Every structure is written in structure tokens, then in C-alpha cells.
Amino acid sequence: MSFCNNSIPQPLTFVLAGIPGLESFHGWFSVPFFLVFVITVLGNVTILCIIQVEKSLHEPMFLLLAMLSVVDLSLVSVTVPRILSIFWMNAKEISFNACLTQMFFIPSFYVMESGILLAMAFDRFVAIWHPLRYTTILANNVLVKMALAVLARAVAVLTPAPILAKRLESFQTHIIAYSYCAYMAVVQIACGDISDHIVYSLMVIAASVGFDLFFISLSYGLILRAVFRIPSWEARGKALSTCGSHLCVIALFYSPVVFSVLAQILGYRMAPHLQIVIDNLYFLAPPMINPLIYGARTKQMRAWVLRILHCHGD
């Protein structure tokens, strides 16, 4: 329940607080945010260009990586510029409709990324269990269907968010203590019964991150089962090394979510500014580090990056 003695009607504009309590440090915060944006764009564009140019990379694993890079670029494009405008120009006002748009697109891209990581886990499962039928099982038409399924799920689970938020009629304040329009941040300043909104939010987490984590864990359980049946230790190491980059990306992507959920379950209440910084890590750290991981751990990618750097050096 969230009742108010003095409520205001649905405002035409909200005010995004940025990082409450640390307003005087917004200028300093803008530096890492800007660097994250630049590194993310350069890294993911480089990955996409290499995959497009190098014919040997036109295989399922790298095509899924290209999808991941597209989603990463989209995610930082809808978050970082708006956050930087708050830090640099104090442009905190956002219209109600623009807030609803952010509320849909930001978590949608996050859910899409989670879905692609699940698809990549399935790719590694097929590569280990059915290596001779790998390209047949994961043909291009199958990859297209997987991409459409990832997109459809994101649209299906996130479309209700702006619709439900639009129905909120009165609010405690028009100030959102966040750096972007998060669904629950808006719901928590609303007046009236918000239990339905909390249930919906939990359902979104269960149907996206919870679902994906379960099947990723299942995939890697079966992968480990297959790997440890291989008699040769050298062959085991080679099989596991093909999963190394993906495991690093999974750990990076899901760690902030798991940490946040465990903190709430254990009753640990973080300071508001710390919670917002961690929430920003959900969206900003993986898109920046994903291309660095794949660029460093994938032989073909590493060769192309070194070739590009060598050309620039000459």
C-alpha cells in the first residue's frame, strides 16, 4: 500500500534526480559514464565490422554475438545520453510519455540480452553434445526464429509496464529518485494500492532473468556432464575453453541482479545512491565489457583487432 495525505494528479512531466544525495558529484560521475559509452560503441561496432568482413566468422556462435552487440548498442543509446544530459546540463525534466517510453525500451533491451545469452548457452550445448550436426541444428533459419522469439518475449513481458503506469492517477511527488524512468521507481511514488504492480514486476523477473538463468544452468550442467565423459584431459580443456568467453559474460551480466536480490532476501538495505549505481551497472557494464571479453578470448577476433591496431600504428 502507498497512501498519501497530500497527493498530486498525474503530472505532465517528471523530474529525474540523477543520483540522489550525490548531486554535487554529478560532474565527476559523468566522466566514467561518458567513457563507458565511448568504449561500448567502439567495441561493439568493431565486433560487428569484424564479423561482417571475416567470412569464417559467419557461423552460429558469432552471429549470436553480433545480435548481442546490436542489443548492447541499443541499450547504451537509450540510457547513457539521457543520464549525461542530467549530469552535464541539469536537464532533469522528462515528459510523462517520454518516461513511459524509457520504461518500456530500457528493460526490453535488458531482457533481450538475457534471451540472447540463453541462446548462446544452447549454442555451446549443441557444439559439445552434437558437434557433427552443429551447423545443421543451428542453421540460419533457426537463428532467425531464435532472434524473433527473444524479441517477442521482450515485447510481451514489457508492454504492460507503460500501460499500467499510465493508469496511475495520483502521486506523492513528481520527482523520481533515479537517473532514468524505472517502472518500480515510478510506481513507488504513486498513491494507492500498488500490490498489482509489485506482482507484475516479480513476474517479469521470473519470466525473463529467472527463466533464462535456470535453463543456462541446465545447459552448462549437461555440458559439464558431457565434457567429463571425455577420457582425455587435453580434450576436456579444449571443450571447456570454447565456453570460457560465454561464461565470463554470463557471470558479468547476472552478478549485479543476483547480488541485489540476495541483499533484499537477507534484509540488507543499501543506501539509495548505492542502489542506483548498482542498477546502472545492470545496463552499462556488460555492453562495455562483452566485446573486450570476446576480443581477448576469441582467436579470430584477437587476430583482427591486432591487425587493425597494427595498421593504425603504421
Image: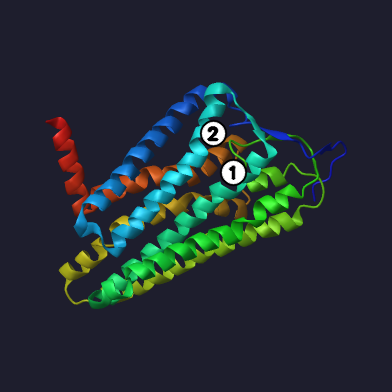
Q: How is the image coloured?
A: rainbow
> Image check: 5 left or right of 36?
right
Q: Is residue 195 visible?
A: yes
Q: Residue furthest left?
A: 314
| Amino acid type shown at disc 2 | Arg
Q: Residue at position x 77%, y 47% from top? A: 168
Q: Which residue is mark 2?
A: 82
The picture quadrant where one finds residue 178 is top right
Q: Which disc number belongs to residue 219?
A: none
Q: Give percent across and percent down for residue 74.
A: 46, 45
| Amino acid type shown at disc 1 | Gln
Q: Give percent across and percent down for residue 64.
A: 35, 59
Q: Residue at position x 61%, y 45% from top? A: 101
Q: Nearer the viewer, residue 188 or 44?
A: 44
- Proximity of marks 1 and 2: CB atoms separated by less than 8 Å: yes
Q: Give percent across and percent down for residue 35.
A: 39, 32
Q: Nearer the viewer, residue 7 or 165?
A: 165
Quick one: SS at disc 2? helix
Q: Which disc number belongs to residue 102?
A: 1
Q: Give percent across and percent down for residue 194.
A: 76, 52
| Measured Cα–Cα span from mark 1 to mark 2 | 10 Å
